[in-house]
Amino acid sequence: MENNKEKLESGNRGWTSNWMKELRDWTLSLGVAITLAMLFQTYAYAQTEVHNVSMQNTLVEGERLIEDKWSYRVSEPKQGDIVIINGPEHELRLVKRVIALEGQTVDIADGAVFVDGIRLEEPYAKGETFPGSLDVPFVVPSGHVLVLGDNRERSQDSRDFGPVALSSLEGKAVFRIWPVDRIGSLK
């Protein structure tokens, strides 16, 4: 009888030990998964939402985008990239298009944008482009880009706050994930 009691107690200890091991393994796995997901979103790719009309008709308010945060760590932005700006240039995170790179000369005349004397073909632009407070022609300084919203008549951009430092480029918008009927890569 005493032998059975000892077996029962030792079985209970084994069950408790297995349960605690299982709980520890799940907690560790969940902790690692959450940590990796947070690192991935912070340093590689993230979801972002469009909050204004400055990029219409390319992007409209409420759309959700995938932002590539990794590319600009290993390469420079390119003319035409749609970028997420998060820096001292503006108090809000902004989505804009790169129009000119460091060293390029930007001029705005007759409602159009010229870079290094060549008129940009901008089928994505809505409305006419005016210089605003940007003193044109303007040479983009080293370590900066010039950005404009696609909705030229309703955008706060480099014409208002000047060139954007490369260090203020949080990432590149690469893919639209919402709404479903507009899912796809961005151009």
Image (cartoon, rainbow, N blue to C red):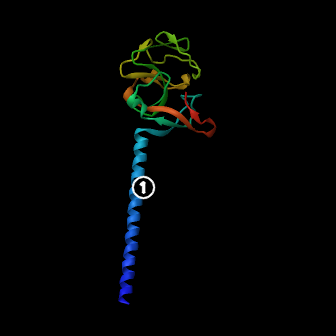
Tell me where residue 37 appears, x and y as whole percent.
43, 46
Q: For the view shown, which residue lies furthest in the top direction?
A: 117
Mark 1 residue crowding within 10 angstroms, few (<14) / some (14–19) / many (20+): few
On the question of residue 95 being in view, the answer is yes
The amino acid type of the residue labelled 1 equals: Leu
Q: For the view shown, which residue lies furthest in the front direction?
A: 3
Q: In the displayed structure, would residue 184 be above or below residue 115?
A: below
Tell me where residue 36 appears, x and y as whole percent.
40, 47
Tell me where residue 109 appears, x and y as whole percent.
52, 11
Q: Quadrant of residue 8?
A: bottom left
What residue is rendered at 47% in x and 25% in y? 157
Quadrant for the C terminus, please: top right
Q: How many marks?
A: 1
In the image, 27 versus 133, the foreground residue is 27
In the image, 21 versus 51, the foreground residue is 21
On the question of residue 85 being in view, the answer is no
Q: For the view shown, which residue lies furthest in the bottom direction?
A: 1
In the image, 121 versus 93, the foreground residue is 121
In the image, 36 versus 179, the foreground residue is 36
Quadrant for the N terminus, please: bottom left
Q: In the displayed structure, would residue 128 be above or below residue 65?
A: above
Q: Quadrant of residue 86?
A: top left
What residue is rendered at 41% in x and 68% in y? 19
**In this figure, which residue is indicated by the disc labeled 1?**
30
Q: Quadrant of residue 160?
A: top left
What residue is rendered at 48% in x and 35% in y? 67
Q: Is residue 88 left or right of residue 155?
A: left
Q: Is residue 101 left or right of residue 180?
A: left
**For the residue labelled by badge 1, is the local secondary structure a helix, a strand or a loop?**
helix
Tell me where residue 179 appears, x and y as whole percent.
60, 39
